[in-house]
Amino acid sequence: MAHTADKPVVGVDLGGTKVLAGVVDREYKVLATAKRPTKGETGVDAVVERIAKTVRDAVREAGMDFSDIAGVCSAAPGALNPEDGIVRLAPNIEGWEDIPFAKLLSDQLSGTPVFIENDANLGALGELTLGAAQGVKNMVGIFVGTGIGGGIVLDGKIWRGSHMTAGEIGHVVVLAEGPVCGCGNRGCLESVASRTAIERDIRLGLRTGRESMVPELLKQAGRERMTSGILAQAYEARDPLVYEVITRAQHYLGIFIGSTINYIDPDMIVVGGGVAEALGEAYVEPVRAVAYQYAMNRKDARNVKIVLAKLEDHAALLGAAVYARQRLARRS
Amino acid sequence: MAHTADKPVVGVDLGGTKVLAGVVDREYKVLATAKRPTKGETGVDAVVERIAKTVRDAVREAGMDFSDIAGVCSAAPGALNPEDGIVRLAPNIEGWEDIPFAKLLSDQLSGTPVFIENDANLGALGELTLGAAQGVKNMVGIFVGTGIGGGIVLDGKIWRGSHMTAGEIGHVVVLAEGPVCGCGNRGCLESVASRTAIERDIRLGLRTGRESMVPELLKQAGRERMTSGILAQAYEARDPLVYEVITRAQHYLGIFIGSTINYIDPDMIVVGGGVAEALGEAYVEPVRAVAYQYAMNRKDARNVKIVLAKLEDHAALLGAAVYARQRLARRS
């Protein structure tokens, strides 16, 4: 019989729109994945059931039996306590407030050990252990997608803060009195630099008659939402509207990163998430240029590396696998 | 002969305009102080000589001999390395770039051990050990004066960052594209919430004919500069111009603190410095109200305490005494 440490684990990336599960072996190879829509509107129990099914699908896809799995870790988008397994509040999934998520999921998975952690924290842990920030002591991971999440690593460990809510960088204000944010305040980083902010500003431009290839790209793709892929296509083609809007978003992200250098002074900033992945190095380069201008100590600013994340779509999933192994090791 | 641990130490608060030295006994009682203008324009060596004289004055004032002193610690306003004793850059004192300050001062003080540390870090350490934040694990100290300095305490220790430059909160941007800051960028916290920013906006109002009691108060005090004391007098009298300008500064400081709750999630924020001391609780209350609105998790935001600093003028000096004792204990 294999030791727990040799058995694969399942990492889960639970988001507002989809659930992604992956079976990950002890060398952090992803053996198989499975995916389902989240459908938050169906209620907490139904969502947990869908997650459990997705986990079992991934295990089956890997040609394994569920008893081959040492444990499961799920990322969740929101404030949660990884020690008691309770999600305090996940604003992007309907009704997720004070939910004993780890226990509910474990009950659906024959009592297998289930751990949970914030998705951006796991993204940062993934990059730290397997990605762009290997061996780095102090790091801030920034994940730009529908929202903007952050994971802080200090002295090689995830910094959770005093109330498990640290790293909510999407709601750090960079442009006071700026656009209204989903949180109800104005000028949060998320309100000026997320994919949602970019889409809002492009739609505003289109409504006022500015020319852009975006409507044609949406029609071709049969989509309503401006995915990161569609934005990347238009940006690369130097579509004037898209290029201007994304350049502005990069400017604000650069200002935030410059502020972070002044405030926290890390070794490295890792930029990931859907938007960064789709645009690649072309996205990070202008961000970097602004950030170094906003660093107080300009002479030495470049000591703080600003790099693209490496794990792409699998950052949270792999981070979840790393965290599951850490927690299982603590038990044995 | 008294043990080193029983002997007093001298704490020094070196600023852009004045040097304050204090003899501090082992119970952290300030036995005597002395003061001199900094006169940065006289050159590094002359400034160090003036600091040494001020230290000796304070010791004499305490009725002691310099051999009674266990060691000296000086705060300095800028980026420095407390381990090698070198000031990298103190922008408010002419020519202070790559200065071996600890060694120069020790040479002027008969070889007595001299330690150095950033002034805001020492302010935070003082509040943590002797002031408003006693027993607190995670804390951000904010010192509002001519500029805005910050000291971060994580897990009970000063957080210096990867390159000894953490805590430069005066240059965290809250209002991108806002007023030009001394650092050359726009919209830094310092450019919208420092005493300098308040004075700039009041002068602008006066120039355009707005009524205010400030010119009369300046005349009475025989001053050109709007000191924190003069601002406090006008604020308390509800002078419409001063009240509006300070209210705006409080708003931006509140936004910064809300962002800090979201980013770092500390147990406590301590607000000190000349402006906060002069205005007292009346200054902190509106700041607190804004900060809690900008905290992401509004339900629990009040778990993060936002309080006035307690050590007033002596925060950096007492922090320096605490740090001197810590470093001396490490040696013995």
Image (tube, coloured by chain):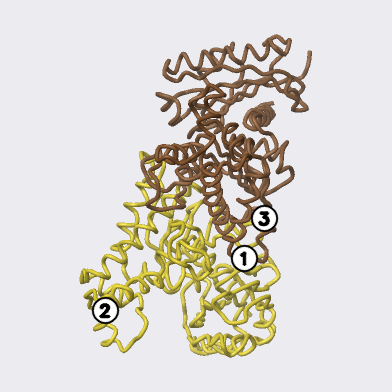
Chain colours: A brown, B yellow
Q: Are marks 2 and 1 in contact (CB under 8 Å)?
A: no
Q: Disc 1 sits on a residue from what chain? A: A
What type is the residue that disc 2 sits on? Val
> Residue A114 versus residue A202: which sits nearer the camera?
A202
Q: Residues within 10 Å of mark 1 (few under 14, many from 20)?
A: some
Q: Amino acid at mark 3?
A: Val
Residue type, label 1: Asn
Which secondary structure lies at badge 1?
A: loop
- Is residue B155 shown to the viewer in this render? no
Check the picture and name the quadrant holding the N terminus of chain A: top right
Which secondary structure, mark 3? loop
Where does the image place residue A179, in percent across and percent down from the top left? 40, 46
Disc ID at residue A230 = none
What residue do we see at 50% from left, 19% from top? A38
Report the front residue among B143 and B67. Answer: B143
B10 versus A139 height, above or below: below
- Which numbered dot is residue A297? 1
Above/below status of B162 relative to B299:
below
**Label 3 and label 1 in one chain:** yes
Figure quadrant of residue A279: top right
From the image, tell me which residue sits under label 3.
Answer: A304
Report which residue position mark 2 lands on. B214
Using the image, name the chain to which the residue with label 2 belongs: B
Q: x%, y% of residue B270? A: 42, 59
On what subunit does the disc labeled 3 rest? Answer: A
